[in-house]
Amino acid sequence: MNIGDVAERSGVPAKTIRYYEDIGLVRPLRSGNGYRDFAIEDLHKLAFLGRARSLGFSIDECRTLLSLYDDRERSSSDVKAIAQKHLARIDRKISELQALSATLHDLVVNCHGDDRPDCPIMDDLARAGTA
Amino acid sequence: MNIGDVAERSGVPAKTIRYYEDIGLVRPLRSGNGYRDFAIEDLHKLAFLGRARSLGFSIDECRTLLSLYDDRERSSSDVKAIAQKHLARIDRKISELQALSATLHDLVVNCHGDDRPDCPIMDDLARAGTA
DNA sequence: ATGGGCCTTCCACTGGCTGGAAGGTCAAGC
DNA sequence: GCTTGACCTTCCAGCCAGTGGAAGGCCCAT
């Protein structure tokens, strides 16, 4: 399979696939003309990667997940540990953003938003160093 | 004021301040010895920037906010519009992350996490292209 | 004059791609 | 057989918002 085919079938852009080869996530063969020649396993790995990335796993986590994917002796606890760590990171991020959202919401609702310069949002920003 | 002083008083690292000068967010004077010489207004601007960045505004938004900060004829509606757009972006991000969190949570609770290889997380990732 | 703590510039690196240039390959149509 | 266009290749640059570090200059106290 050429890169265009795997790109379409895996949902991972060709550019990204080349990048993944660069950093050693996939190792397609080469045809006589120099084109990459992807096996069906490569397609599976790329779809796997696409899904893992869309779930927010880092490239490094994907690397580990891929090696576990290949490993028939793996322990599901290893997989679970990675996912739990990732989940914790996401939940932390959500909390941060919620705090941010609350602050911004307060500022926004208190700003009358007309053509006068007075603005609690600006006041907050300007008061920054004066606390 | 030297850069170390403004860094400490504004809470913005010296490295970052130099970067902000590079991209034109602040324009400190120079002393005879080539050192940057920050006025009190520069300090205010840097604290403003630090606060705006900590609220998640992009550098470009900060640039606009700074120019509004300097503008006594500004309309609070301009400030409000930027903040609202930013708030909407954050709330969108929160939704995305919550969906992600829910998916990961489901996968994690269904994984027994022992030394056997069977793992619903892996199954999900591997099923990616097979839908 | 020596040491330590400032300051300066410049370059490289981060993550995870993405865009684009310059050029080779292949299949279809004329 | 030649052209066209869609594919493929490599390599370099850029994104965002800094951060780390090297090499060297400046200033003040001892």
Image (cartoon, coloured by chain):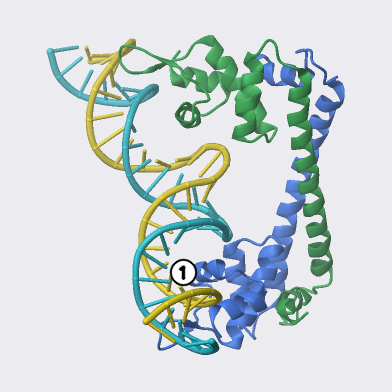
Chain colours: A green, B blue, C yellow, D cyan
Q: In the visual, does D27 lie left or right of B99?
A: left
Residue at the (51%, 18%) spot, across then down: A6
Residue at 61%, 68% in the rendered image = B62
Total number of numbered discs in the rendering: 1
In percent of width and height, residue A122 lies at 72, 76
Return the x and y of residue B112 as percentages of the image width and height.
Answer: 85, 19
Residue B38 location, quadrant: bottom right
| Percent coordinates x, y for residue B27 in the rendering | 49, 79
Tell me if residue A92 comes above or below residue B72 in the rendering.
above
Examine the rendered structure and indicate whether residue C11 appears above or below residue B130: below
**Residue type beneath disc 1:** Asp
Left or right side of C28 for B104: right
- Disc 1 crowd rating (10 Å Cα; few below 14, some 14-19, many 20+) is few
Residue B100 visible in the displayed image? no
Q: Quadrant of residue D11?
A: top left
Front-lying residue, B116 or B61:
B116
Name the residue beneath numbered marker 1.
B22
At 70% from the left edge and 70% from the top edge, which residue is drawn?
B51
Viewport quadrant of the C terminus of chain B: top right
> In which chain is the residue bearing label 1?
B
What residue do we see at 69% from left, 60% from top?
B56
Relative to A128, say whether B72 is above or below: below
Name the quadrant of the N terminus of chain B.
Answer: bottom right
Give SS at disc 1.
Answer: helix
Q: Is residue A7 left or right of residue A48?
A: left
Residue A121 visible from this viewpoint: yes
Image check: A54 left or right of A112?
left
Residue B125 drawn above or below residue C4: above
